Image: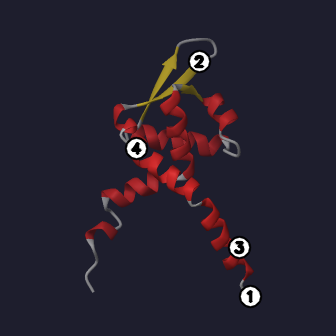
């Protein structure tokens, strides 16, 4: 059976989903669409994110060209993150996914209840 190239381990699209399409990255991009944001403000806004998870997500997004990091020479040094033009191109598809999730939340919750209620 032939394997579709999109499923190859080194496929760029697969790498994108692995690196960018996770809950923290999506939330970070959503925050940055509003305005540039500093690290500690992310920590306050994104309930449950750890220092390590935020750092890793910001680095992945910067590496993939979706956000920019700006260092201010203050004492102590402060860092601000902003969304790039490339990152802004994700606003429509991410917004559609969010709207879909909100629109189908009741159905998803019902499906979870049915699944969880089954005897194992």
Q: Name the residue nearer the viewer: 9 or 85.
A: 85
Task: Determine whether, in the image, residue 43 is placed left or right of residue 1.
Answer: right
Mark 1 → mark 3, Cα distance in angstroms? 12 Å
Q: Which residue is mark 1?
A: 119
**SS under mark 3:** helix
Q: Position of residue 48 (x, y in %)?
A: 70, 46
Within the image, what quadrant is residue 51 found in? top right
Q: Nearer the viewer, mark 2 or mark 1?
A: 1
First of labels 1, 3 by sequence position: 3
Instruction: Indicate the secondary structure of the residue bearing disc 4.
Output: helix
Q: Choose the circle earlier in sequence order: 4 or 2.
A: 2
Residue 77 — which label? 2
**What is the count of numbered marks?**
4
In front of the other: label 1 or label 4? 4
Measure the alpha-carbon separation of dots 1 and 4: 40 Å
3D distance between C-alphas at marks 3 and 2: 48 Å
Identify residue for label 3: 113
Q: Is residue 94 above or below residue 1?
A: above
Q: Is residue 12 above or below residue 41?
A: below
Q: CA distance from mark 3 to mark 4?
A: 31 Å
Q: Residue at x 52, y 50 (%)?
A: 98
Residue nearest the observer in this picture, 112 or 103: 103
Q: Position of residue 74 (x, y in %)?
A: 58, 11
- Color style of the picture: secondary structure
Residue at the (52%, 29%) spot, across then down: 34
Where does label 4 land, which residue?
A: 92
């Amino acid at each position: 059976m032939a394997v579709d190239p999109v499923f190859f381990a080194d496929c760029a699209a697969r790498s994108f989903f692995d690196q960018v399409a996770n809950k923290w990255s999506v939330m970070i991009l959503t925050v940055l669409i509003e305005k540039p944001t500093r690290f500690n403000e992310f920590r306050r806004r994104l309930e449950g994110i750890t220092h390590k998870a935020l750092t890793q997500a910001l680095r992945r997004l910067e590496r993939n060209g979706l956000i920019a990091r700006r260092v201010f020479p203050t004492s102590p040094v402060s860092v601000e993150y902003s969304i790039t033009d490339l990152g802004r191109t994700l606003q429509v598809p991410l917004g559609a996914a969010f709207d879909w999730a909100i629109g189908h939340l009741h159905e998803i919750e019902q499906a979870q209840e049915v699944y969880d209620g089954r005897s194992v």
